[in-house]
Amino acid sequence: MQANIVLLPGDGIGPEIVSEAVRVLGAVSDKYGHTFSFTEHLMGGCSIDKYGSSLTDETLADCQASDAVLLGAVGGPKWDDPMAKDRPERGLLALRKGLGVFANLRPVKVHPALIDSSPLKPEKLKGVDILVIRELTGGLYFGWPKGRDSKDGRMRAVDTLEYYDYEIRRVIELAFRLALGRKKKVTSVDKANVLETSRLWRQIAVQVGSDYPSVALEHVLVDTASMRLITGPVHMDVVVTENMFGDILTDEASVLAGSMGMLPSASLGASGPGLYEPIHGSAPDIAGKGIANPIGTILSCAMLLRHSLQLEKEAEAIEQAVDETITFGARTGDLGGKLSTRQMADEIITRI
Ligand code: NAD
């Protein structure tokens, strides 16, 4: 197979981890006889510095024309001014919107050999295998009106939480489809006791669920869900929720795995290229030292192969190589070891 992948290494540790992930993709293409071509662009803070824009039209157009996009991370103290005209995160939101990727998938699995790296008790973590799906392009982060005004001498700020039925339906349908290939359970998270958008969310979850009789559906309020993620994560399979709840719950879920450096993500739309990135940020505290854990990015490549290129066997080859590497005892600093970013990638490549 031939595929055109756009690379957006971004800021901080982004370039270090993306270059290792590209070597892993190279090992896969050599082994299975594929041709992956790569086009690289600046995005985020580095793009603001060079072009005055966190995401240029040319970069977005190239991403839209590709088969898949692999992103490192964006941001850093240099671009942290909340009042700045452009910020790295703006580029990320514009990229998601421009690609029409409405569902963010974050699998959270706890490797048995890393169970002690998690702040949770080992007995709570055994067998945890959750897929959190967050709605990505609607809700409070995009609703209109938003902004500030002043009334009667008081300053007022407004954000709007709105959802259309189709925005809810497409992400819940994806959750059910993916649950079919897993433990066949969907937990739909909302705040239906308070929010009208949540009541619509719940209504549509029930409608969609009736098309999937073999999948169990439960509704859980977001406050309860945040507790259950800690007290009984093993009972969860696919969790689907709206944008802001998902933003918070996905970070909470990531703690289960012990290190931010381990977890991948995929953002998918109805068609067109998917966007793949580790869940962590640009880690400015360790940038440039060559010690970042590349596994989150490497596992994001496995998701890229699976969801955008339909290369299931190749995706599993990466996941298995990562599994064996961890079982063997290879560890970067975040996992209590001494391996460099490159050495960790080498361990994985050897096993591919
Ligand atoms: P962060 O995820 O960058 O770092 C949090 C901690 O985890 C740090 O101690 C860091 O060293 C460590 N860490 C993260 N990834 C690691 C890896 N691969 N290997 C080893 N250790 C790792 O979060 P932060 O410090 O809150 O944010 C730093 C910058 O990243 C900010 O500018 C933030 O806006 C940005 N950010 C970007 C994204 C993104 O690009 N999607 C996501 C989150 C944060």
Image (cartoon, rainbow, N blue to C red):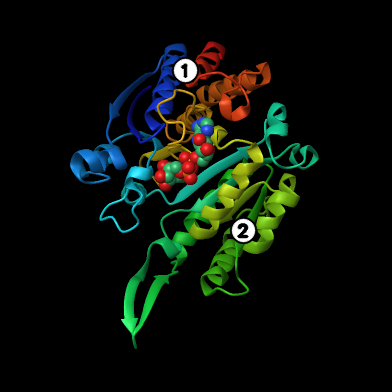
> Amino acid under label 2?
Ser
Establish whether ligand 1 lies closer than 8 Å to the Cβ of label 1: no
Look at the picture and state if 200 lies above or below 264: below
Residue 198, picture quadrant: bottom right
Residue in the image at 44% along x and 69% along y: 162
Q: Disc 2 or 1, which lies upstream in sequence?
A: 2
Residue drawn at x 23%, y 40% is 49
Pick the residue in front: 165 or 71. Answer: 71
Determine the residue located farthest toward the bottom in the rendered image.
152
User: Compared to 140, does 306 lie above or below?
Assistant: above
Q: Is residue 213 left or right of residue 349?
A: right
The image quadrant where one finds the N terminus is top left
Under mark 1, the amino acid is Arg
Q: Residue furthest right?
A: 123
Residue 230 in picture, x, y percent from top left: 71, 50
Which one is nearer the viewer's eye here, 128 or 214? Answer: 128
> Which residue lies at the image location 53% right of the left edge and 11% below the top edge?
350
Q: Name above or below for residue 113 compared with residue 98.
A: above
| Residues under numbered marks 2 and 1 in contact, where contact means CB atoms less than 8 Å apart | no
Toward the viewer: 230 or 76? Answer: 76
For the question of whether residue 269 can be seen, the reply is no
* Marks 2 and 1, how far apart at CA: 39 Å
Callout 1 secondary element = helix
Q: Secondary structure at mark 2?
A: strand
Q: In the rendered view, does 40 fall on the left or right side of 289?
A: left
- The residue at 58%/40% (across/down) is 107
Q: Please, is residue 255 above or below residue 150 in the view?
A: above
The x, y position of residue 6, in whole percent, is: 32, 32
Residue 342: give its label. 1
Residue designated by label 2: 188
Q: Is residue 113 visible?
A: yes
Q: Is residue 130 left or right of residue 99?
A: right
